[in-house]
Amino acid sequence: MVAIYGDGDDHAHNDKPTFFKRWFLSTNHKDIGTLYLWFGMASGLLGGFLSFMMRLELKEPGIQIFASEHTYLVFTSMHGLIMIFFMVMPALIGGFGNWFGPLMIGAPDMAFPRLNNLSFWLLPVAFVLLVSSFFVQGSSSGNGFGGGWVMYPPLSTSGHQGPAFDLIIMGLLAAGFASIFGAINFITTILNMRAPGMTMHKMPLFAWSILVTAFLLLLALPVLAAALFMLFFDRNAGTGFFNPAMGGDPEMFQHLFWFFGHPEVYIMILPAFGIVSHVVSTFSKKPIFGYLGMAYAMVAIGVVGFVVWAHHMYTVGMDVDLKLYFMVATLVIAVPTGIKIFSWLATMWGGSIRFEIPMLWAIAFIFLFVIGGVTGVVLSMPAIDVALHDTYYVVAHFHYVLSLGAVFGLFCGFYYWFGKIFGVMYNNILAQIHFWLFFVGVNVVFFPQHFLGMQGMPRRYIDYPVEFATYNEISTYGAFITLAGVIAFFVMMAEAFIVRRPAADNYWGEGATTLEWTLSSPPPYHQFNTLPRVK
Amino acid sequence: MTDPESIDAEISEALNAQKKSASNRKTLGVLTVTAFAMLGLGFASKPLYDTFCKITGYGGTTRVASENTSDVSDRVVRVQFDSNTSKDLAWDFTPEKPYMDVNIGANNLAFYTATNRSDETIVATSTFNVSPVKAGPYFSKLECFCFTEQTLAPGESAEFPVIFFLDPLLLEDRRLDEVTTVTLSYTFFPVENPVGTIKEAALK
Ligand code: HEM
Ligand SMILES: [Cu+2]
């Protein structure tokens, strides 16, 4: 034990508690981070299963797999909600944020360890509520809620009068409050608990990304909560916030939802930005190019992200001047985003690049995120968007930034810190297989969807005219390849845990300069009892 | 661990920890208040939103005027009338004429006809807007059936009047130079708990 966990300052409380105490009553940021990672993986499997069924259904025109159209819509809605709230957010923010937020700033733990425990354990509760909605009455057409992850009324009020959607509201409120608690914890930790000498302007970019993300969560999630409460009251208490018959306005829900929703998309990508920055710098053996610009670009993205929300609503019939404003504001975000892209490229420029697994994911991330960003800029023009809105073009756009952006960032961090978290190293060949299958797979799934969208195929339908058959078939083959990639991932995991190649303290060598690399792998149960001093 | 220096270090660390947890609590307070403020703002958006639409005419919200003192202009705009009913409302509801050509500034009177197809007395209320939405701020109503709830006995028909004018300020707004047609649209919804009018209906 001492060999693994001890160095100079092992106090008596370096012993680990019993299994139940350690995992269920855990207040240790690293254990909670690990729990988040496993949780995200599990919900990722369920969310992935749902999307795989959708792709199977869409392989050919006609209705093959699903018993009813409603069930298909339930699958799309739940896929979106699960992937966003129970996979990407827990893994990126809860998992890596908990693990490496405190480590990178030289803090012994999070500011409020017990609140941290609550944040995590609210999630499984929320997940059970959400998933149980599958099995109870949603609308007259069947079980579950099929109104999309955006939950617009009146489809989510008079259109789904069964209790299924009430369960979803409760689940999302629980997950939302968990995230708000988490955000408060992260902000307090990062603002107050940095090691001596670790000024804000020396703080690693991943810590910056978590700080900005936490502020976005803190400001955006309560607005979602308010909107969900109003939906709940409209459904169950006879209010009419979104009911025009009672003087309400369903469009107001869209405003509230997207006031949350647009910052939410950055909540999912900023931590990935942070991770990719470290990986690019490590494997180029150079400090990140334009450190301050990178940090403040994230701040700028966060701030501007709050004033662009109506680019999701160009088709509601808004005033042309308002459209103009939202278009310009949206385009402005491309500037700090560009700063990040070019700084990554400049970091690699002239560096001695090593194509280790995390670097492959990082480079793929940059490449795919740029594609998604470019289609985003296309969509931000109202004149084009009225044609492309709610087509597969939008689906392609947000999957390029999310399932090929945020998820690649996730895997990037996972491989970068695998040895640090688990104390064992992965097998390089298996990891290569995982990467290449996944990379090819998701591109084959989503690239053809650009064409489908431009040809006018609308999203959220179980069936389509035969003109769209070819690209849909290709897209489904991509899903098979991706599935093979996911299997390779789990084989890689299993192999690593069976063979147990011990990981060195700093297995990436010279380029890895942040504080977590000064500790053992895995780090001691309690680290930094004597605070490190940063020059 | 017993030499005096390390005791000193431990004491100063304990003091530091105390300071830390005090400032942590302060941050916790500020952040919690922020979260609640955003929650409150979410709810407050309802009145804010309504007020915003009324003041600016966004979303094609029309104006209510108490009198019309404007000069009548030569410019003519075609006002089209549109009518809708909620699927839960057993009323027929149609404009008397599909459109009117009106002079900007002049008062106009238009009628809609409604018939109760059901065998119950029904109270209903209507929402309205105009498109293009940018014409909203210049569309003023002096009198409208949409200001109050309407009641129809079984099989009863009624004519609903609306008196409106187009505000001459429209002439000065360059964005409306190309507007030659404005559509006024109503949608009727059943009222579940009507206020006031229900008693009269019961007495009839
Ligand atoms: C340069 C940056 C970006 C721009 C200009 C942009 C622009 C847009 C626009 C205009 C839409 C609305 C399309 C429509 O519904 O008709 C949209 C949708 C979307 N974007 Fe982006 N986007 C950008 C980056 C991102 C990023 C980084 C993410 C997430 C990581 C993201 C996630 C989404 C999602 C999830 C939707 C669809 C939501 C839905 O309708 O279900 N976008 N984007
Ligand atoms: Cu957006």
Image (cartoon, coloured by chain):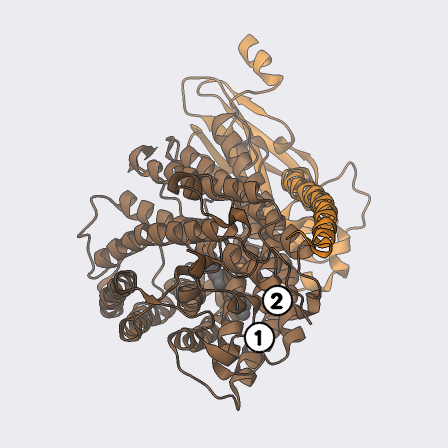
Chain colours: A brown, B orange
Q: Can see residue A345?
A: yes
Chain letter belonging to callout 1: A
Q: Is residue A139 above or below residue A355?
A: above
Q: Position of residue B202 (x, y in %)?
A: 54, 10
Is residue B96 shown to the viewer in this render?
no
Do the residues indicated by labels 2 and 1 lie within the same chain of the protein?
yes
Dot 1: within a 10 Å radius of its alpha carbon, few (fewer than 14), some, or many (20 or more) residues? many
How would you rate the neighbour count of disc 2 (Cα within 10 Å): few for under 14, some for 14-19, many for 20 or more? many
Q: Is residue A151 above or below residue A140?
A: below
Query: Residue type at mark 2?
Result: Met
In this rendered view, identify the residue nearer to me: A423 or A97.
A423
User: In the drawing, what numbered circle is on residue A298?
Assistant: 2
Q: Which mark is residue A340?
A: 1
Front residue of B93 and B75: B93
Q: Quadrant of the C terminus of chain A?
A: bottom right
Outermost residue, front side: B3
Question: Is residue A192 or residue A350 the one in the foreground?
Answer: A192
Q: Residue at x 58, y 12 (%)?
A: B199
**Residue at the spot x=27%, y=55% of the render?**
A54
Give the quarter of the figure containing the N terminus of chain A. Answer: bottom left
Q: Position of residue A386 (x, y in %)?
A: 48, 62
Residue at the bottom extreme, as displayed: A350
* Residue sticking out furthest to the top: B203
Query: Closer to the camera, B89 or A464?
Result: A464
The reply, left or right, for residue A55 in relation to residue A394 is left
Mark 2 or mark 1: name the one nearer the start of the chain: 2
Q: Position of residue B56 (x, y in %)?
A: 71, 49
In the picture shown, does residue A398 fall above or below B40? below
Name the residue type under label 1: Lys
Q: CA distance from mark 2 to mark 1?
A: 8 Å
Instruction: Check contact, mark 2 vs mark 1: CB within 8 A.
Output: yes
* Chain letter for the residue marked with disc 2 in the picture: A
